[in-house]
Amino acid sequence: MNSLPSFDRFDVIVLGAGGAGLMCAATAGQRGRRVLLVDHSPEPGRKILISGGGRCNFTNIGAGPANYLSANPHFMKSALSRYTPADFVALVERHGIAWHEKTLGQLFCDGSARQIVAMLVAECDRGLVEWQLGAPLGEIDHADGHFRVGVAGRMVEAPALVIATGGPSIPKLGATGFAYDLARRFGLKVVEPRPALVPLTLPAEEALFRELSGVATPVTASCGKAVFREAALFTHRGLSGPAILQVSSHWRHGQEIGIDFLPGETPGWLRSAKRERPRGALPTLLKERLPDRLAERLSERLGLGGDLGNQPDRALEAAEQRLSDWRFRPNGSEGFAKAEVTVGGIATAGLSSQTMEARGVAGLYAIGEAVDVTGWLGGYNFQWAWASGWAAGQAL
């Protein structure tokens, strides 16, 4: 990587050396475009490096439009269909990176996330991309069909500018709302950003559950029409784990979420247990299905003491119903500091779904997390980064 550009005029300036920016720069560069890739961080791909526990959940084999949230649920169809998970896997394999599949179609490196960053850097170098890392941006102007950007004390210009600076999630890595401010300057609208794939907090009256910090169990979590069957984790502040992170992207303040603590349990199982084990107790039954501490807390809340044989069927039915749809009303989330991604962003109404170019500003593009497209947990957001970056790179 070159630390300073060797000239002032380029065909493309890409702002942001995350997943989308790296893919876009590499794609455009390999098509013969003179590309400058700029980032205030001293190293590229910082979010990639911490993803997947350091092994990078780099895509999901089932990624499709249904796995994304956006004000326009059709916007992502074009890019996702033209650059698929199989395309990225082929790139990974060309670079000799070993990988494996985990649950629900999630693909990870056998080794380190650094392999994915190194691969993308190598692809950029193959496209002769110029680099400017570790320097804050100066003024950004647009006139006479060219964008002029202040970088490291000098002005560079190009007829195309790509916004790939992501959203404000994980600010400790330098994430900000810069993309939205820049988009608004050019007349693009922004869908209100909020934290996504983020732990939810519980109010004081739910302290009984917060005392279960560290306890995890498979559940089905729901919020509105969104339903996810994965693990939930109790924390000292509230709820986390994959199932909760998934529904958090759909959750709004004031809404309840529902948790089925016994997904797949046959309706009527408690009444059947009453007949088969009349001297049994609810805590004992629940401990056969759930972690002990959780079983005890749920039993306390349900208030069914004594032998099952002494409980009326209607009380058992009510307990079953509550266990299958236990309602929590979070009082907030842990915010952008703990959010993996951002819901909202640059409104897709102002962008071409084919090229990611702004409809009203020729040469301006927006890709990746900066755009109002948010994937599920499990490699989907990286696939959007690759697909949107590739789509823009093909159009530049």
Image: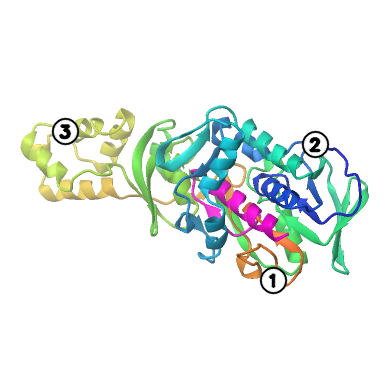
Q: Position of residue 235 (x, y in %)?
A: 46, 35
Mark 2: which secondary structure? Answer: loop
Q: Is residue 203 visible?
A: no
- N-terminal of the two: label 3 or label 2? 2
Q: Position of residue 245 (x, y in %)?
A: 48, 45
Q: In the figure, residue 5 lies in which quadrant?
A: top right
Q: Position of residue 196 (x, y in %)?
A: 54, 50
Q: Are the residues at dot 3 and dot 2 in contact (C-beta closer than 8 Å)?
A: no
Tag 2 residue: 1
Gap in angstroms between the C-alphas marked 1 and 2 = 33 Å
Q: Badge 3, how many Cα within 10 Å: few under 14, some, many 20+?
A: some
- Compared to 166, does 359 lie above or below? below
Gap in angstroms between the C-alphas marked 3 and 2 = 66 Å
Tag 1 residue: 359
The label shown at residue 217 is: none
- Disc 1 marks a residue whose amino acid type is Arg
Relative to 221, 132 lies left or right = right
Main SS class of the magenta portion in the image: helix
- Quadrant of image for the C terminus: bottom right
Q: Is residue 119 visible?
A: yes
- N-terminal of the two: label 1 or label 3? 3
Tag 3 residue: 281
- Disc 2 marks a residue whose amino acid type is Met
Q: Nearer the viewer, mark 1 or mark 3?
A: 1
Image point (34%, 38%), residue name: 218
Q: In the figure, residue 281 lies in which quadrant?
A: top left
- Compared to 159, does 26 lie above or below? above
Image point (73%, 43%), residue name: 124
Would residue 72 be counted in the magenta stretch?
A: no
Q: Badge 1, how many Cα within 10 Å: few under 14, some, many 20+?
A: some
Q: Are the residues at dot 1 and dot 2 in contact (C-beta closer than 8 Å)?
A: no
